[in-house]
Image (cartoon, rainbow, N blue to C red):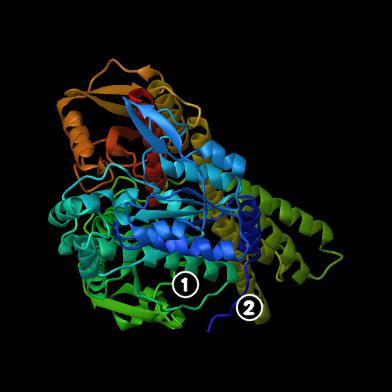
Amino acid sequence: MHSQRLNPDKILKQIQQEAIKSQQGRLKIYLGAAAGVGKTYAMLSDAQAAQARGVDVLVGIVECHGRTETEQLLKKLEILPRQHILYHGKELKEFDLDSALIRHPELILVDEMAHSNAPGLRHNKRWQDIKELLNRGIDVYSTLNIQHIESLNNDVAQIVNTRITETVPDSMLEMADSIELIDLPPEELIKRLQEGKVYVPKQAKIAIERFFRKGNLTALRELALRISADYVGQQMLNYREIQGIKHIWPTKSKILVCIGPGRESLKLIRAAKRMAVSLKAKWIAVHVATPSIKAQEQILPLAIQNLRLAEQLGAETAVLAGFDVVQEIMTFAREKNVTQIMVWKTIRNRWRDLFFRNLADEMVRESGELDIYVMTGKLGRLKLRRQVKTKPPFKLKNYRIPLVIIALATFINFLIFPYLHASNLIMIYVLGVTIIALFGQAGPALFSSILSVLAYKFFFVPPFYSFSIADVQYFFTLLIMLLITQIISQLAIRIRRQATSARTLQHQTSGLLALSRQMTSVHRVEEALSIGLKAMEDLFNSQILALIPQNRHFQCYSTRGIETKSLDEKEYSIAKWVLDMGEMAGFATETLADAKALYLPLIGLRNPVAVLKITPNDKHYFTPEQIQFLESYAHQIALTLEVIGFEKSG
């Protein structure tokens, strides 16, 4: 059992979030699979109960649709007069946001969150009115049908064969302090429709024939149950994180599959997909990148391709960074409340298990309450093309500083040798080796460890000025000295590499935040692309072009603005495929992998709006972390381009 310990950083973060939330209103959403399940009735019932407790309640806007029981509940509540808007000769009655803000009740009811406001009002959508109410410290009750959630737009369109145009961003669900699912079996809802309790008889008949078929309602109900379960699951994860709970709560199955660069990962991914389908569980594909992994240009892209395959099969993907693969995976699994882990174990000679680390066995030892599924087999070794450079070239200048530092340590030891015992001189050499290791190179660190042992023996261990050992005890002293200096140097190298990785991550994250701030004040396509491409080129050391579709060709943009050069036939084909499919292609992918550039789609809220052509300057591959950051930057640019497009069309 893992100890339960509160995380001070997470507690501080929670306190800060609660301090911000205390100044805002609280949002409760009544979620249903379709109209007529009883969302508004439940909302009004809760409002009456709140009023009975002494809460100042105001009905901002509620649509009764001729339902007698709903109208009865309204009679006991204060109702805000509606705002009258004249539009194309018709009088529209809308929610009066300004009057609601002046009245400033403790709790306001705003029905139909996805409603589009009449032209001329401050906000285009009612959910934006709700957001402003919350920011002014007013609690809000609102209703929402599952088909209006933005991320489910494509799924709903496939189910009901109709594109829903009025949508609410998922961020509104994330803002909600409470989501209450109002559930009703399809048979009962259809019965309510037939009895005229949802729409008038003529409308009800059309609704049953088109939208309210039993199959449609069953599928929408499943979506509503899933969204509600996801919300509850996220609440549980937040609670576990804040409370520092490490052991697993098996509320539902969640699978984690460990991904590497080899072909065995393909078998793992497919098996994990089958298991996830049979258990109706979520699954996560994870790759751990460690500084000690020598990821050559032909190997690392395989790990990226494997992650991409898992993503295509419906997995959530994550790239972890750390030194201990097992510990990183176990920590991540417990944070995500994973119940099963899938890992590959290669069949090999028994003697190799005695001397070399076995990932699967270590995971079983560390698993605790986690279930570990081990797949095994004997796969052929990866056949890689012979590479010109299999290791960094030897550079003599890298060994000059270690030589100087060990010489200086020897000189200092000569000065203090008459006053101290010889064993104390070892610490001077240890200090020198540690300083050398801080430069972060393994070769010079190993060289300095061996050189310091030789220097210590030659100058300070009898017989002097000889490498022969007269006393056996000095042999063990020298051996331990070599081990200590090597261990310390390796630890120093690890710390330096970890600090470098952390700085890189922080630099990329802060760059993304800075880009999002800059994009808020941009109103022209050229300006947005110039800022975005400049940020990406600086961070990823690449040449980047934005390809904007225009009629039957692409207009090329760089950091300097519009480029006169055009794409050749092959580049155009790749860019067109990426735009149509919404998937990356080219370099470092499994689609058109011989291309010299990576082609990345700029995907906004719905569809790709452009393509980025990314040509690395001096790197042979993109790491998984870089791929994820590239996608994040691309998404930020795409959202800005969509906003600019909406502003122009509006």
Q: Using the image, determine if residue 362 lies above or below residue 424.
A: below
Give the residue displayed 32% in from the left and 25% down from the top. 89
The answer to which of 219 and 230 lies nearer the viewer is 219
In the rendered structure, the answer to whether residue 2 lies left or right of residue 472 reads: left
| Residue 64: image location, x then y, percent | 36, 53
Give the residue displayed 25% in from the left and 46% down from the top. 589
Residue of label 2: 476
Q: Quadrant of the C terminus?
A: top left
In the rendered structure, the answer to whether residue 501 lies left or right of residue 349 reads: right
Category of crowding for the residue at label 2, using alpha-carbon neighbours closer than 10 angstroms: few (below 14), some (14–19), many (at least 20): few
The answer to which of 81 and 504 lies nearer the viewer is 81
Q: Indicate the secondary structure of the residue bearing disc 1.
A: helix
Q: Quadrant of residue 209?
A: bottom left
Category of crowding for the residue at label 1, using alpha-carbon neighbours closer than 10 angstroms: few (below 14), some (14–19), many (at least 20): many
Q: Using the image, determine if residue 628 lies above or below residue 37.
A: above
Q: Quadrant of residue 549?
A: top left
Residue type (three-letter) at the residue carrying disc 2: Phe
